[in-house]
Image (spheres, grey):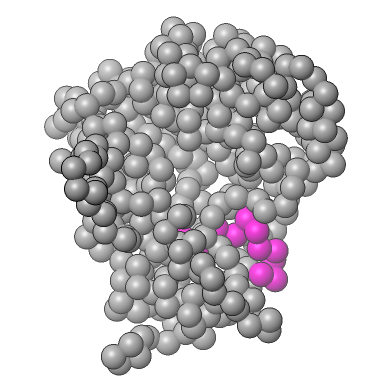
Amino acid sequence: MTQPASPSAPVRAPAPGASLNPLLAAVAPSPVVEARRWIAGRVFAPERPLLNLSQAAPADPPPPELRAAIAEALDQPRAHVYGPVLGLPELREAVAERWSEDYAARISADEVAIAAGCNQAFCAAMATLAGPGDAAILPTPWYFNHRMWLEMSGVRVLPLPCGPDMLPDPEAAARLLEAEPRVRAIVLVTPNNPTGAECPPELVARFFDVARARGAALVLDETYRDFRAAEGPAHGLFARPDWREGLIHLYSFSKVFRLTGHRVGAMIAAPERLREAEKFLDTVAICPPAIGQIAALEGLRRLRAWTRGERAATLARRAALEEAAPRLAPGWQVLSAGAYFAWLRHPFAESSADLARRMVEEAAVLMLPGTMFHPEGDPAGRATLRMAFANADEDGVREALARLGRMGPPREGG
């Protein structure tokens, strides 16, 4: 049995006589799409505008250098035709060079694939690893699109609850692997979506060892690596001679270069695995969008200092959150924070699924409830909320916490 997420609208039955893939029908709607419905058509008072902290995506356009590169790309014939399935060679080479530097390792261009976003890279990676009836381990709270894709594919999702520090336990993962012989992968996201927690290098290494010992892969999603609080390499796996036997690294250019609409992600894995992923990528997209790749390449070449500034701004938002957290109303708690996210515990008896809707009405704050990041019925989901503060400045973060603190329990009969 898969583990459907809780939240939202019931699955609609197909029209009479029409067929519907039961795996797809069993998957709950996207939480971000669902949350947009809560504010559709609403007008908020000018003195208390909506604070939309629901989606982990920058709203500002790319910096001027990238907009100029995009404009110039429009005159290049290669921007308008099919390109290589695994991405532009010069972008693959640039990723290999930068990642080799950042991880103190040697990565080659034939170990890099470019995809139409990190979500597509994840789907391609899992397509090389698992099929119907196989299983994958996802720490909870999980990134909901990972869970959605696995369930659509008939891959069983095995939840791995995080501890009080919001980090998963590799020993608990080892026990799941021993009990479930068809586990093909452990999936880690660090810094994490939804909690912001960063896995220290030694924890990442331990998960890799646990997976390798049992013939599984470690799928390591580092979409938010540019916003880590810790200095130095995020892990040492690429420096290990056996990394190609069990590591698949995923990345997104969307966040750091503000290219969300251009869909550019990356996967680093053994060349043999990328040849298998190529079949998937060719089938679903043929090739990643050329204009986004040209922009990502320009970003890698020219925006290192700008990237450091984006990291500093993100860390300043986190610092504002942590500074304001002690002044939250009793019962509220920031459980973890990092990159684009904070993971909050609320003090009310109601489920976070109900509270999140009430927050729109009473506080003009939109966040996603913890129920969207946990298996259905998990009490941890009922008590938590995700704050995605990518589009809030420091004052916006403080204002969001202040508004939450002024909320009371639900009214009787409300």
- Name the residue located 63 percent from the left edge and 55 percent from the top edge: 390
Q: What is the residue that sits farthest to the bottom in this orientation?
A: 412
- Number of disc labels: 0
Q: What is the x, y in percent for residue 100?
A: 64, 19
- Tell me if residue 149 comes above or below residue 375 in the rendering: above
Residue 207 quadrant: top left
- Name the residue located 26 percent from the left edge and 54 percent from the top edge: 12
- Tell me if residue 234 comes above or below residue 40 in the rendering: above
- Tell me if residue 302 comes above or below residue 355 in the rendering: above
**In this rendering, does residue 329 appear at all?**
no
Which quadrant holds the C terminus?
bottom left
**In this rendering, does residue 133 appear at all?**
yes
Q: For this rendering, which residue is in front, 279 or 265?
A: 279
Q: For this rendering, which residue is in front, 306 or 75?
A: 75
Q: For this rendering, which residue is in front, 367 or 104?
A: 367
- Name the residue located 70 percent from the left edge and 58 percent from the top edge: 316
Magenta highlight on residue 391: yes
Q: What is the x, y in percent for residue 105?
A: 60, 17
Magenta highlight on residue 162: no
Per the rendered image, the range of residues in magenta is 386-396
Which quadrant holds the N terminus?
top left
Q: What is the x, y in percent for residue 328?
A: 52, 78
- Name the residue located 26 percent from the left edge and 23 percent from the top edge: 131
